[in-house]
Image (cartoon, rainbow, N blue to C red):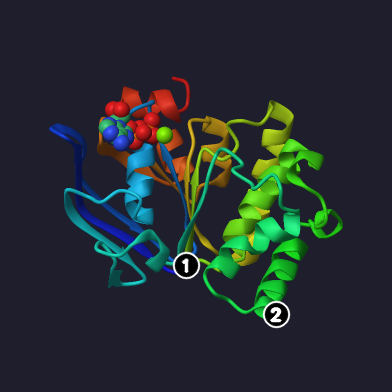
Amino acid sequence: MAELKLRGINKSFGSVPVLHGINLDIADGEFVVFVGPSGCGKSTLLRTISGLEEPSAGQVLIGGEDVTEFDPSERGVAMVFQSYALYPHMTVEQNLGFGLRMGGMPREQVAVRVAEAARTLELNDLLDRKPRQLSGGQRQRVAIGRAIVRQPKAFLFDEPLSNLDAELRVQMRIEIAKLHQELGATMVYVTHDQVEAMTLADKIVVLRAGRIEQQGSPIELYDNPDNIFVAGFIGSPR
Ligand code: ADP
Ligand code: MG
């Protein structure tokens, strides 16, 4: 696992600025949640960390190394997407191992990684199934499993639970919290769900129009929001 640092990140699409001078330190093992209104730049910031977007200016450091010029596959971080994006014709086991095999990892080593991830996520009894034979929650666990097998330095989640119904969302939220404890992993998580942010985060980062409006622990932001905008997202009703 590793610390993440963002230094003066600017991002424009064409002539439209989307991120403005973002500076952020994420400690090794920290669970950081980005919140903010639709279109404020949460996904773009996450994609800048993963390398799916290149910043117009600034640096991304992972584990102390400047990775700004690195391809996504060279950064050692894993993105968990909202859509399940599993291969429908492959079994769970094949889905879990596919990325590693494509990366050239020997079959035996892939099998060990897949078995470990299956144990962590309690997928052992489902390894021979196809995605269509899984529940929504099970599919989401496989999607997370595809990140775990890579043993990434950090996990990046972009609204991973937003397609699930309310009950399942609660269940998966608890599982993600457990996973964070178990792996001690650095996690960056985008959501617009206040409860998810409050319960999962060590630190919440409130974004507004491409800037960090305020950051702090859930309690700090809840008790002492700097302004009414932050209060609207996570502050206590006053
Ligand atoms: P959020 O995830 O907070 O909803 P995004 O990071 O997806 O916000 O988007 C921030 C802004 O950047 C939005 O105005 C969006 O329309 C714009 N944007 C995002 N991706 C692109 C792109 N590939 N091309 C042009 N504009 C984009
Ligand atoms: Mg988004």
Question: Which quadrant does ligand 1 occupy?
Answer: top left
**Crowdedness near tag 1: few (<14), some (14–19) or many (≥20) residues, C-alpha within 10 Å:** many
Give the alpha-carbon distance from disc 2 to disc 1, as whole Å.
Answer: 22 Å
Q: Which structural element holds mark 1?
A: loop
Q: Could you tell me how many numbered marks the image carries?
A: 2
Provide residue 43's location: percent of width, then percent of height: 38, 39
| Disc sitting over residue 153 in the figure | 1
Residue at image point 62% right, 65% down = 149
Q: Which structural element holds mark 2?
A: helix
Q: Is residue 89 above or below residue 136?
A: below
Q: Amino acid at mark 1?
A: Lys
The answer to whether mark 2 and mark 1 are in CB contact below 8 A is: no
Circle 2 sits on which residue?
A: 108
125 vs 1, left or right, is right
Residue 206: tell me if it is visible: no
Q: Earlier in the sequence, mark 2 or mark 1?
A: 2
Provide residue 105's location: percent of width, then percent of height: 58, 76
- Residue 75 quadrant: bottom left
Q: Quadrant of the C terminus?
A: top left
Residue at image point 57% right, 33% down = 195
